[in-house]
Image (cartoon, rainbow, N blue to C red):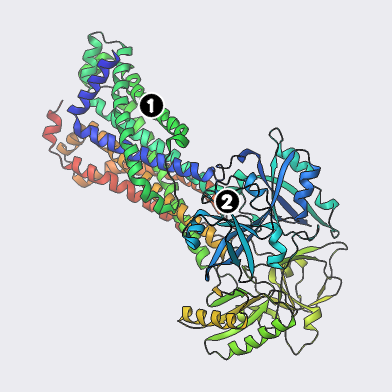
């Protein structure tokens, strides 16, 4: 029986080729879109899962709390890793890492490499590294050891057989290559091209790695034992820092563990430097919503198309029922037809996926691939879902038709009212989906444009920055001489030296303040600067004055605050007020400026003076159209004066924001693409629904025309029905839009307002979709000869 039903189904499809092609193509495009989105969601939600210890690896995070201020950092004292491993039985292993970038020289060729780490010898064992050459257990044990990726080995040596060769690091330190590993996977929150042994840290940087409990200079990962619960371990280690380092009154530092599987999508609010790549879980929620909408639209379109064909088969089904066909027989027949259609569509959709995948990867700038040994479970789930869709699509028309009387079939007047109600529900749903998709596409596009053009509180263009290693007073005098030389260049506007600058580091200190409650403190983001910093960065002064050489005490006892700090202290007029038990007097207030990321609110900030620099940051503002030439001239000048230190001035790049924005741009492009595809599927469904409806109303239209109704009046009458449905769908859609907007905008500390214009734009575009989908069919039906419709049976 099953084989016979399948043969009948195939013959029917071949007989109705046009209908079959349209149905298969629509279903295939919907399925291909869903599969691609599921691949993307799986890729994004399984970052770092390639690690064999994936379920046992956690990052140690530090919550810094002062009053009502709270910040989470991925940095902690280096000494903490050893303490955790030795004192917490549930922790099997622990390792320290620290991001670095270095100049690597081999055979007189120098390479500026940005994706490096300092790491303990346990790091390659805890995380999954596939070594091509060398021993991963021993590779990072000795000082001045380095392991490099296969790509980097081929880049600098033209071969991976580089073990035992010496690389010159930063023009002055010899490191021995002890291992070559396969390129670290891109789907990791870590971004690694090379790793230097952590016990080389002091020799290469001049800073102690084990500087004590008061220096948060490392990112720590731990590996728990199989039966350990990480939440219990988090509670156990929470207060370790409070019992070790020095803490001022009102300040607490609490530890917790974060699974590595949550770092990529759930730690955009964590400060520090260990996260090479980050995204945002809200983006995944958006795509899940699009997948659900696309799936529902695809299924309903297919069911609607199948149901629409039943009006041509009612006589056939009625005769079969008269001749004794059972409901079971009809069910098997329709399910067979539906399965044939969905299997064909599934095969076509897989072909579309394989063809589209390279273009899809180019669109999102990722390398998503399909591998049967890895993605077999997802493929099985999709296959099962397709068969469920086929079954439901076959069952609906059977149960629908089997409930009708045989006389209705034979007279061709089966329950029109019930089909009308279904049609209206489907129209409302399709429109209700279209409005939120259009709105969110508009909103997130405007949000990215807003971030790209937001006033960040200083002028970023034309700023060249580089950190300069200084060995003592002689090097500092050399820097001051270079400032004088640079100012003689007409293309150089200003030069400044500082400990840090916007998007280039910074400290954090706690202060009490004049007028504050006893024992109250506030954590301030801090930068130590010189006299030319404000002018170089073109930061606006809103009150008071800048640091000046004419005021000798500025160097020791003056400070400047940003507007957020003044508000935090509760001052109306900050000039002349003091902080830190009167040690620092406020001489000026600057406009708030972003110094870390646009995705977090600007913190309260303090600027103080310093002239005793250690490895300071040099910033040069240039004003020229020939930026590359001036950049090269400045690099040459500094390297002539500091021949033993690698120096490269680069134009200021808000790196964290750039990486995050790139991820958002890629996700947004894809979201808009699939949203538009879902809307097009909705248009197709709406078009089919209108066609079906108008075929059912031919006689009504014909009778009205015979009685004198004009084409415009008929158009208005039929369009009115769809406008009512649009109004209902629009109201429901706007409710979902309101909920979606709040969740989406919560990702951004600074965001566009949800303006009435965006709602109107989404509504107008949805209305345009309705009019385009409906009007051509209505006009065509209105122009048809009424005699044909009245004479038709």
Q: How far across and down, in percent of the image, does residue 606 sit?
A: 73, 71
Q: Is residue 396 above or below residue 267?
A: above
* The quadrant where residue 354 appears: top left
Residue bearing the label numbered 1: 387
| Residue 158 in view in this figure | yes
Q: Residue at x 45, y 54 (%)?
A: 666
Quadrant showing the N terminus: top left
Q: Which mark is residue 189?
A: 2
How far separated are the C-alphas under marks 1 and 2?
Answer: 37 Å
Quadrant showing the C terminus: top left
Q: How far across and down, in percent of the image, does residue 562 sit?
A: 69, 72
- Marks 1,2: beta carbons within 8 A: no
Q: Residue at x 38, y 40 (%)?
A: 430
Q: Residue at x 19, y 43 (%)?
A: 780
Q: How far across and down, in percent of the image, does residue 290 sit?
A: 44, 43
Check disc 1: other Cα within 10 Å, few if <14, some if 14-19, many if 20+: some
Counting labels gives: 2
Query: Which circle, 1 or 2, is nearer the viewer?
Result: 2
């Amino acid at each position: 029986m099953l084989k016979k039903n399948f043969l009948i189904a195939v013959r029917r499809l071949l007989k109705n080729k046009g209908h079959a092609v349209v149905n298969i193509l629509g279903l295939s495009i919907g399925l291909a879109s869903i599969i691609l989105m599921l691949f993307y969601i799986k890729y994004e939600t399984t970052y770092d899962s390639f690690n064999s210890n994936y379920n046992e690896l956690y990052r140690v995070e530090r919550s810094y709390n002062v009053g009502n201020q709270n910040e989470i950092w991925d940095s902690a004292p280096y000494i903490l890793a050893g303490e955790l491993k030795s004192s917490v039985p549930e922790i099997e292993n622990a390792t320290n890492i620290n991001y670095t970038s270095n100049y690597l020289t081999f055979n007189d060729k120098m390479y500026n490499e940005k994706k490096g780490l300092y790491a303990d010898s346990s790091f390659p064992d805890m995380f999954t590294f596939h070594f091509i050459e060398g021993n991963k257990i021993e590779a990072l044990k000795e000082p001045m050891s380095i392991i490099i990726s296969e790509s980097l080995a081929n880049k600098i040596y033209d071969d991976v057989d580089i073990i035992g060769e010496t690389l010159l690091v930063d023009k002055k330190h010899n490191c021995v290559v002890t291992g070559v590993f396969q390129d670290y996977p891109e789907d990791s929150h870590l971004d690694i091209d090379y790793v230097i042994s952590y016990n080389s840290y002091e020799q290469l940087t001049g800073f102690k790695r084990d500087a004590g409990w008061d220096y948060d200079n490392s990112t720590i990962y731990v590996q728990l034992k199989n039966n350990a619960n990480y939440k219990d371990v988090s509670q156990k280690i929470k207060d370790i820092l409070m019992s070790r380092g020095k803490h001022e009154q009102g300040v607490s530092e609490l530890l917790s563990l974060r699974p590595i599987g949550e770092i990529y999508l759930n730690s955009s609010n964590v400060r520090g430097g260990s996260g090479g790549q980050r995204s945002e879980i809200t983006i995944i929620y958006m795509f899940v919503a699009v997948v659900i909408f696309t799936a529902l639209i695809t299924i309903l379109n297919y069911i609607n198309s199948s149901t629409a064909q039943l009006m041509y088969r009612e006589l056939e089904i009625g005769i079969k029922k008269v001749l004794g066909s059972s409901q079971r027989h009809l069910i098997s027949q329709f399910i067979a037809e539906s399965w044939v259609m969905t299997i064909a569509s599934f095969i076509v959709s897989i072909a579309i996926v394989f063809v589209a995948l390279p273009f899809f990867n180019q669109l999102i700038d990722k390398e998503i691939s399909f591998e049967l040994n890895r993605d077999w479970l997802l493929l099985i789930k999709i296959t099962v879902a397709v068969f469920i869709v086929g079954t439901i699509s076959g069952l609906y028309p059977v149960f629908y038709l089997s409930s009708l009387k045989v006389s209705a079939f034979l007279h061709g007047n089966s329950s029109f009212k019930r089909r009308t109600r279904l049609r209206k529900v489907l129209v409302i749903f399709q429109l209700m989906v279209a409005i939120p998709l259009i709105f969110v596409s508009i909103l997130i596009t405007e949000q990215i444009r807003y971030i790209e053009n937001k006033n960040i509180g200083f002028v970023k263009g034309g700023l060249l920055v580089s950190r300069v290693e200084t060995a003592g007073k002689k090097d500092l005098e050399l820097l001051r001489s270079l400032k004088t030389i640079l100012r003689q260049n007409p293309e150089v506007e200003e030069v400044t030296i500082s400990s840090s600058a916007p998007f280039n580091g910074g400290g954090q200190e706690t202060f009490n303040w004049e007028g504050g409650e006893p024992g109250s403190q506030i954590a301030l983001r801090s930068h130590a600067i010189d006299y030319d910093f404000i002018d170089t960065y073109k930061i606006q002064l809103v009150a008071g004055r800048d640091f000046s050489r004419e005021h000798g005490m500025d160097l020791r006892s003056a400070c400047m605050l940003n507007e957020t700090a003044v508000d935090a202290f509760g001052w109306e007029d900050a000039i002349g007020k003091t902080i830190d038990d009167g040690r620092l007097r406020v001489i000026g207030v600057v406009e708030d400026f972003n110094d870390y990321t646009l995705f977090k609110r600007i913190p309260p900030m303090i600027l103080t003076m310093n002239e005793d620099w250690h490895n300071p940051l040099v910033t040069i503002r240039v004003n020229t159209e020939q930026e590359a030439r001036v950049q090269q001239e400045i690099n040459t000048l500094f390297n002539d004066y500091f021949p033993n230190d690698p120096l490269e001035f680069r134009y200021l790049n808000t790196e964290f924001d750039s990486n995050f924005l790139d991820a958002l741009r890629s996700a947004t492009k894809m979201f808009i693409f699939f949203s538009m595809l879902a809307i097009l599927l909705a248009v197709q469904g709406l078009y089919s629904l209108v066609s079906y409806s108008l075929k059912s109303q031919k006689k009504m239209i014909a009778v009205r025309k015979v009685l004198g109704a004009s084409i415009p009046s008929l158009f208005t009458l039929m369009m009115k029905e769809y406008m009512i449905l649009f109004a209902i769908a629009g109201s429901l859609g706007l409710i979902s839009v309101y909920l979606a907007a709040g969740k989406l905008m919560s990702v951004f500390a600074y965001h566009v307002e949800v303006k009435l214009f965006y709602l109107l734009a989404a509504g107008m575009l949805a209305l345009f979709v309705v009019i385009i989908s409906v009007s051509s069919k209505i006009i065509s039906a209105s122009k048809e000869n009424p005699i044909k419709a009245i004479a038709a049976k």
